[in-house]
Image (cartoon, grey):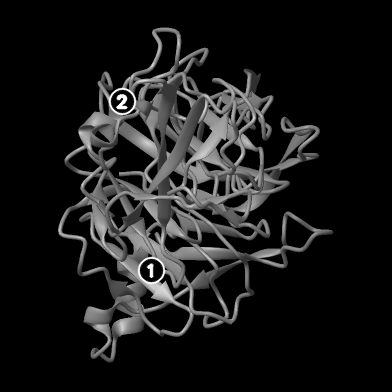
């Protein structure tokens, strides 16, 4: 199987990764900043740095991230000039989108951020309907709008041609800051971030859901993330009935959040036509009188940790019943917890601060059977004979985050996972 990574962040904000082909945590040397939160999936990682800015890390791929910009040049025939850009007042713009309603001159196209570059200059698309045109890409019609043909006829009064230019995303295998003009005028910095939702829809390709929580307890959703637009377009606030402190998003349509008071929120109405969902439902804390502090969701499971560090499993959770039917107390005390694609569970122990995974998780037994500690040294400790013990003690501050892991640890293979650091 291809090499994949398990990510972690320590209390100093340093990012580490553990490869399925490696035997130790590798320090991400490119990360010059200190990070508070990291959330990751197969193709990328999102993070909140200590400068309160949002950063994105995209893994290198054999398939480049390219986007095709297009605009249409429109002309009308008149008996003096022939075809020219002298259009009627009721006509579309000389340069427009395919509908003719949006003004799109060549010079108005700008790169979304410094992480993009133009591959080449504008050129005319000389194909129409899969066949080459004979008139420099022009297609003809009686009037705007109408059915266009590649052949000029005696009654062809208007014509248009499509101009194309490709831009390529160049920032891969490095952390890049999402520009401020893209994040907009947010009222306060983000405190938590989670990414998922890749199973909700196949169109557009690579569509993702990115949720975030601000210091004021507001919830935000990043719109427009897909393969051709990995940075997304804009943040939109999602109203919530209270102050949220933490949020978790699964690969499908499950989104849960923890309220400041200790109860939990479940997002309903999420689907391919509405990635943000439509409403919130409140679910009480697993233990009456003890507030929930952390929640993690997967495909068909929800796990939670309460203030007394007890671990809880939510039974009856699925796409048709995102709220589930009840809580089951589990053995063990954990500081935080998270879930992978196959509903594999990872956690940070409360007493020893070690990294654990849940053994025995299957489709028929989603709650698993027992916790097993994961002890792997960091690269700086590899040469020390006592590395295993010291490394395990220092990993108290690590949060496991991502993706496609585990043949090297002999745990079992799953696809994606993500964790958020309680910093």
Q: Image height check: is 201 above or below 95?
A: below
What residue do we see at 59% from left, 30% from top?
154
Q: Residue at label 2?
A: 215
What residue do we see at 20% from left, 66% from top?
30
Q: Nearer the viewer, residue 71 or 55?
A: 71
Give the crowd class for mark 2: few <14, some 14-19, many >=20 residues within 10 Å. Answer: some
Question: Disc 2 or disc 1, which is closer to the eye?
Answer: 1
Per the model, the C-alpha gap separating discs 2 and 1 is 33 Å
Q: Image height check: is 364 above or below 87?
A: below
Q: Which of 314 and 64 is in front in this view?
A: 64
Q: In this view, does 361 lie to the left or right of 225?
A: right
Question: Of helix, strand and loop, which one carries label 2?
Answer: loop
Q: Which quadrant is home to the C terminus?
A: top left
User: Where does the image place residue 78, in percent across and percent down from the top left?
Assistant: 41, 20
The answer to which image quadrant residue 53 occupies is: top left
Q: Image height check: is 275 above or below 40?
A: above
**Is residue 315 visible to us here?**
yes
User: Where does the image place residue 195, in percent across and percent down from the top left?
Assistant: 49, 45
User: Where does the image place residue 280, in percent across and percent down from the top left?
Assistant: 62, 19
User: Where does the image place residue 172, in percent across and percent down from the top left?
Assistant: 31, 63
Q: Mark 2 and 1 residues: CB-CB less than 8 Å, in contact?
A: no
Q: Residue at label 1?
A: 60
The answer to which image quadrant residue 104 occupies is: top left
What residue do we see at 49% from left, 46% from top?
226
Q: Which quadrant is home to the N terminus?
A: bottom right
The answer to which image quadrant residue 397 occupies is: bottom left
Residue situated furthest right in the rendering: 364
Question: Of helix, strand and loop, which one carries label 1?
Answer: loop
For marks 2 and 1, the one nearer the N-term is: 1
């Amino acid at each position: 199987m291809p090499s994949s990574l398990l990510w972690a962040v320590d209390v100093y904000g340093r990012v580490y990764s553990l490869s399925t082909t490696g035997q130790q945590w590798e320090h991400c040397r490119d990360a010059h900043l200190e990070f508070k939160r990291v959330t990751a999936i197969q193709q990328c990682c999102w993070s909140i740095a200590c400068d309160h800015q949002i950063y994105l890390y995209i893994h290198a791929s054999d398939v480049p991230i390219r986007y095709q910009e297009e605009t249409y040049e429109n002309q009308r025939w008149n008996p003096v000039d022939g075809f020219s850009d002298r259009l009627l007042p009721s006509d579309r713009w000389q340069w427009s989108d395919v509908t003719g309603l949006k003004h799109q001159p060549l010079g108005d196209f700008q790169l979304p951020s410094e992480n993009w570059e133009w591959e080449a200059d504008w050129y005319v698309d000389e194909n129409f309907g899969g066949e080459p045109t004979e008139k420099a890409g022009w297609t003809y019609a009686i009037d705007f709008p109408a059915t266009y043909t590649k052949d000029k006829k005696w009654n062809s009064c208007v014509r248009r041609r499509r101009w194309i230019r490709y831009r390529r995303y160049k920032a891969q295998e490095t952390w890049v800051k999402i520009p401020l003009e893209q994040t907009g005028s947010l009222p306060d910095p983000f405190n938590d971030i989670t990414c998922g939702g890749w199973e909700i829809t196949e169109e557009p390709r690579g569509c993702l859901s990115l949720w975030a929580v601000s210091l004021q307890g507001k919830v935000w959703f990043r719109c427009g993330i897909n393969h051709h637009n990995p940075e997304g377009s804009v943040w939109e606030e999602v109203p919530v009935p209270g102050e949220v402190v933490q949020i978790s998003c699964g690969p499908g349509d499950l989104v849960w959040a923890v309220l400041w008071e200790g109860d939990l929120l479940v997002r309903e109405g999420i689907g391919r036509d509405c990635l943000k969902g439509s409403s919130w439902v409140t679910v009480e804390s697993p233990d009456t009188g003890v507030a929930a502090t952390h929640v993690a969701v997967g495909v068909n499971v929800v796990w939670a940790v309460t203030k007394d560090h007890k671990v809880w499993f939510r039974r009856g959770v699925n796409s048709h019943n995102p709220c589930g039917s009840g809580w089951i107390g589990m053995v063990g005390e954990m500081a935080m917890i998270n879930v992978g694609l196959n509903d594999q569970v990872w956690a940070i122990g409360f007493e020893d601060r070690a990294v654990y995974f849940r053994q025995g998780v299957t489709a028929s037994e989603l709650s698993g059977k027992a916790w097993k500690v994961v002890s792997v040294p960091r690269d700086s400790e590899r040469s020390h004979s006592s590395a295993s013990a010291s490394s395990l003690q220092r990993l108290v501050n690590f949060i496991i985050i991502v993706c496609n892991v585990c043949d090297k640890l002999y745990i079992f293979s799953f696809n994606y996972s993500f964790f958020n650091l309680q910093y």
